[in-house]
Amino acid sequence: MAAGEPDFAGRLLAWFDVHGRHDLPWQSPRSAYRVWLSEVMLQQTQVATVIPYFERFLARFPDFTALAAADIDEVLALWAGLGYYARARNLHAAAKQVASRHRGEMPNDLEAVQALPGVGRSTAAAILAQAYGARHAILDGNVKRVLARHAAVPGWPGEPKVAARLWAVSERLLPQTRLADYTQAIMDLGATLCTARAPACERCPVADDCVARRDERVAEFPASKPAKARPFRQAQLLVIENADGDLLIERRPPSGIWGGLWSLPVLDPGIEPAAAVRDRYGLAVRKLGGLQPFRHAFTHFELELTPQRLRLVTDVGAAVHEQPDQRWLNMRRDPLPGLPAPVLQFLLRQRAVDAPAAPAPSPTSPNAHPDPCPEPSTASSSAPKRKASTARPSPATSASGSSNMSPSRHGAAGSRTRRA
């Protein structure tokens, strides 16, 4: 560094004062609750996508206490479209923890913040730095890219040794003052100039001593994750109709993919649907035939769903009544419940084929639309509950752990990657 040249943080802050983002809704006021909410929403999701969701969420849940007191269904409904629903469940659980253990206020201790569900080291540091001005380094996806290039740190940041080197660089560059602005500034640099593709190095405030730029190796940093074939899985999607054309749906378990959402029943391949419905729900059905399979790509695997259309036999001996996690859905009349994006899209396509002139269902959430994220979207439901059968779950007929689609098997998550 040339004599008299401002240090890394000084140059970055000077750039931020002129070119940084100062109008993000969580910046004014920069309270711990607002910062925390934004940081969780920004995991794996772009800023432009997050802003309207953040504003709706804040309007309904203005603080930890309000969010902690909310029903999880309402939380999931307002989260509709952001994907990675483990984040919403963790958000709700963390609010409850803050309300019960910290009197409704975000603690100012790094370990205590990291102990909250869904909050890792970088997220905790970002919350404390921006809300309280605490001196903590962060290392989100954008910052990893900035530092990997500036210091020419080789390797994929997901490797522990590489991550350790990047943490050391991040901590070394921390200024003594203006920690909230610095934290936002380094995230802004990665989001707006030091982008993954076509970075604007000529406008970068720290380009003069960027090793990757000096050596003309910017495209090499950070190294990509080693290629790995995405597993392919299959399952059957049971389209169970009653005499009125209503469809049987059930709520999925609270954790795992599509956790807490409503869905058509899912069944492993190779299992006879009618027998499974009899064993699982105590219903007699006849098969109307299979429909065209369709695929949905998740972050870690690709799923092919084969819809099986089944009609309820009218002379069912057993009484049919509603269960808390089962209901009948009328696609023409009922507001849409929280449905996984591929299931919702399938049902809308089928509804268009069966009744192209019928009006679209009226969702109770502004977010009842197909999800742009890798995981499915939801829409809220205030529909009057319709009758559904008594469920009799049977492990022998549940979807296998190999597809992780069973109503009794689950597991999913996502790591934080902020994009502009």
Image (spheres, rainbow, N blue to C red):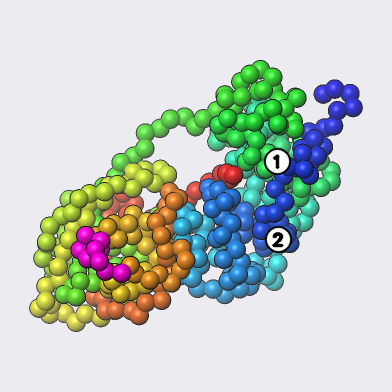
Q: CA distance from mark 2 to mark 1?
A: 19 Å
Label 1 neighbour load within 10 Å: few <14, some 14-19, many 20+: many
Q: Is residue 243 above or below residue 186?
A: below
Residue tagged 1: 186
Q: Is residue 318 above or below residue 83?
A: below
Q: Is residue 24 above or below residue 275?
A: above
Label 2 neighbour load within 10 Å: few <14, some 14-19, many 20+: many
Magenta segment: does it hold 323?
no
Q: Are marks 2 and 1 in contact (CB under 8 Å)?
A: no
Residue range of the region highlighted in magenta in the rendering:
351-359
**Residue 269 appearing in the image:** no
What residue is at 67 percent from the left and 43 percent from the top? 187
Question: Between 192 and 76, which is closer to the camera in this rendering?
Answer: 192
What residue is at 26 percent from the left and 48 percent from the top? 294
Split into 4 quadrants, where in the image is the N terminus? top right
Secondary element type, mark 1: helix
Q: What is the x, y in percent for residue 164? A: 65, 34
Horizontally, is 210 left or right of 330 in the view? right
Residue tagged 2: 32
Return the residue found at the far top. 215
**Residue 67 appearing in the image:** yes
Secondary element type, mark 2: helix
What residue is at 43 percent from the left and 69 percent from the top? 380
Horizontally, is 31 left or right of 278 in the view? right
Q: What is the x, y in percent for residue 111? A: 68, 54
Q: What is the x, y in percent for residue 373? A: 45, 50
Q: What amino acid does circle 1 point to? A: Ile
